Image (cartoon, rainbow, N blue to C red):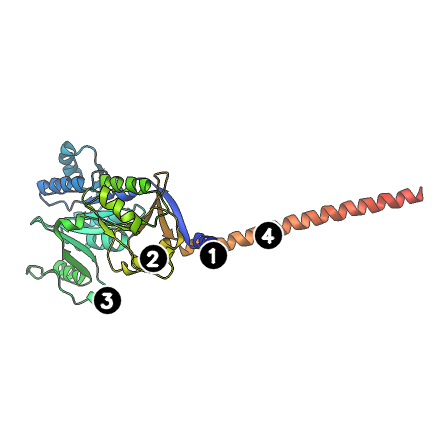
Amino acid sequence: MRIKKTMKRIGKCFIALKQESEGIIGQSVLIVDNGYSWLGQLSSVIERIKNYFPKAEISVLTFPERKSNLQKDFPALNYILPSQRLRSKRYQIALEMLKMQKKRYCFITLFSLDITPLIAALIFLKSKVVLYNQWGQWWSLRLRNVNEIFKVTYVEKKTRFSFKNILKRIGLFFILLQREDEETLRHSILVVDDGYALFEHAGFAIPKIRGLLPYAKISVLALEHREELFKQNFPELEIIQPGKCIIKRYRITRHMLRLRKDRYDYIILLSLDITPIIASMLFMKGKVLLYNQWYQWWSLKLKSMKGYLMVIPLFIFNIIIFAYLLISVFWIFLKRSFNVFRFNLLRKRV
């Protein structure tokens, strides 16, 4: 028990918990209108996103003349208009995207490979970026890793020689495009049931996730005594049973390390057991969430260096306050002792 408490205290020093709304898994989506795509194509994308993410907060970055047409069919969406100071529309869009750096979108949809909005989305907005092209294809976009520099996944059609096309080719050298069609809209979710929470709580979490992301692929990592219950109540789920381990309580954590290569978008924990938290935070790439027994969503993140640096001035400030109080108490005690001594001295004279 002492080891467990010690690990929890250590974990609190490095991990930050923040209570979130359902939007953390319900998705916040930014649709970037390039200004010259067919409006029917834009409407089609909005319908598909609403179908895949029914509880999503959808924002559309578009132009005034197109906003009025879109509002007729989609009045509930959040419309963002770029500044009109720059002539080129693609630069207006990119500039407005740079202003959105503090807003964390889960998902960004582009309609073209214009290099400036593409750079703004991939470098400055830390979100999942997809391309929906004029042929109705879905492509995922991300910056290449070192081992993917010369990997070819997208062959661009030959275009006339121009400075714009040269910049686009240079940009695409560092960007990896992979055709995924609508699979890119399906999230992969791992629910970690370590047995500490009641099954009723775990059983409530699955329908909740289904309501927010109806097309998500959900996998459950659970022990043997839970596996049968999950199969009876949720036969469509993939149930993962952890392998053997010398220390039984670490079986879940050990198996999570085996799953680290699987690209889960979300790892959902049902309790604050420290070892699964460490495994998911350090070795798995997806967002780590806690769905607790009070049906609240909490995000778990490693504390930033800024948080640790703030501890130093706070520590120095506390030392100064402590020293001031210590000196004040000592001075009061010294003054009181001197008064008592003087009173006793005068009393003896009398």
Q: Which residue is mark 4?
A: 320
* First of labels 3, 1 by sequence position: 1
- Asked if disc 4 and disc 1 are in contact, CB closer than 8 Å, the reply is no
Left or right: residue 154 versus residue 212 is left
Q: Label 1, label 2: how many angstroms apart (C-alpha)? A: 18 Å
Residue at horizontal 15%, vertical 47%?
A: 34
Classify mark 3: helix, strand or loop: helix
Mark nearer the viewer, 2 or 3: 2
Of callouts 2 and 3, the N-terminal one: 3
State the residue position of label 3: 146
**What residue sits right under mark 2 in the picture?**
251
**Is 75 rendered above or below residue 180?**
above
Three-letter amino acid code at disc 3? Answer: Val
Q: Earlier in the sequence, mark 4 or mark 3?
A: 3
Alpha carbons under labels 4 and 3: distance apart: 49 Å
Q: Which mark is residue 3?
A: 1
**Quarter of the image that includes the C terminus:** top right
The percent position of residue 279, horizontal first and vertical second, equals: 35, 57
